[in-house]
Image (cartoon, rainbow, N blue to C red):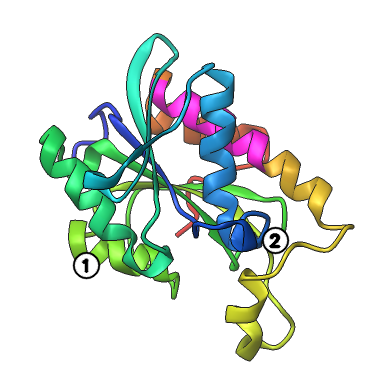
Amino acid sequence: MDNSTPIELIVGLGNPGDEHARTRHNAGFWVADELVRRARGSWRDERKFHGELAKCAIGGREVRLLKPMTYMNRSGLAVQSLMGFLKLAPEQVLAVHDEIDLPNGTVRLKWDGGHGGHNGLRDLNQHLGTQYRRVRVGVGRPVNSADVIDYVLERPRKDEQPLLDEAVLHAADAVELIITGGMEKAMLAFHTNGIVDKKEG
């Protein structure tokens, strides 16, 4: 994997529909929306790519952002379709997603790796392999591990939401820094600020 390869596609993971819009599992959508808002861009429905697509200038570079509308467990279909059209390699893709293995409000960066039980990442790995980069937005874990599915499909508690809102802003900052300075620089910067740990697996 060439870690110096510029990111060309940012994928925010989530589920379509108003009923899912404010649930924990849609943290990736929230970050993608924040990036498009900052760039003063707009989303358009692209059925041939099974999602909503935006083209934005981030840090002086034009990149594409995608929100798959396939539901989480089929995210790879949308991403693979767009990658094929744009002729992109996995290392040119950055996925942003919720992460139950991180405390609520935490942001971490990761080079590649397994899916950790995340259905969106599981499908991305099946379609792309593992050599894409990730920004992970911590949403916390329920006390009972058997409740994970219900937990991520619920809205955060009122006391959790402010931390999660702040994490979305930090995650968008991280994406911008990855675009302008590269993954290693972003990891170093966030590690120094106590937000991102480069050794995080």
Q: Is residue 191 visible?
A: no
Highlighted range, magenta: 168-179
Above or below for 60 versus 53: above
Q: Quadrant of the C terminus?
A: bottom left
Left or right? Give the position of 126 relative to 115.
left
Name the mark on residue 82. none
Q: Nearer the viewer, mark 2 or mark 1?
A: 1
Q: Give the farthest residue toward the right.
A: 159
At x 11%, y 43%, the residue is 84
Above or below for 139 versus 106: below
Q: Earlier in the sequence, mark 2 or mark 1?
A: 2
Above or below for 47 versus 181: below
At x 59%, y 43%, the residue is 30
In the figure, residue 17 lies in which quadrant? bottom right
Left or right? Give the position of 193 relative to 90.
right
In the image, residue 197 lies at what x, y percent?
A: 55, 47
Does the residue at mark 2 contact the one at mark 1 (Cβ under 8 Å)? no
Amino acid under disc 1: Gln
Q: Nearer the viewer, residue 23 or 110?
A: 23
At x 33%, y 17%, the residue is 62
Q: Quadrant of the N terminus?
A: top left
Q: Secondary structure at mark 1?
A: helix
In the image, residue 33 lies at what x, y percent?
A: 55, 35
- Mark 2 lies on residue: 103
Amino acid under disc 2: Pro
Instruction: Mark 1: give few (<14), some (14-19) or many (20+) Cα within 10 Å.
Output: few
- Mark 1 lies on residue: 126
In the figure, residue 88 lies in which quadrant? top left
Q: Nearer the viewer, residue 158 or 180?
A: 158
In the image, residue 47 lies at what x, y percent?
A: 28, 46
Q: Is residue 98 visible?
A: yes
What's the CA distance linking mark 2 and mark 1? 27 Å
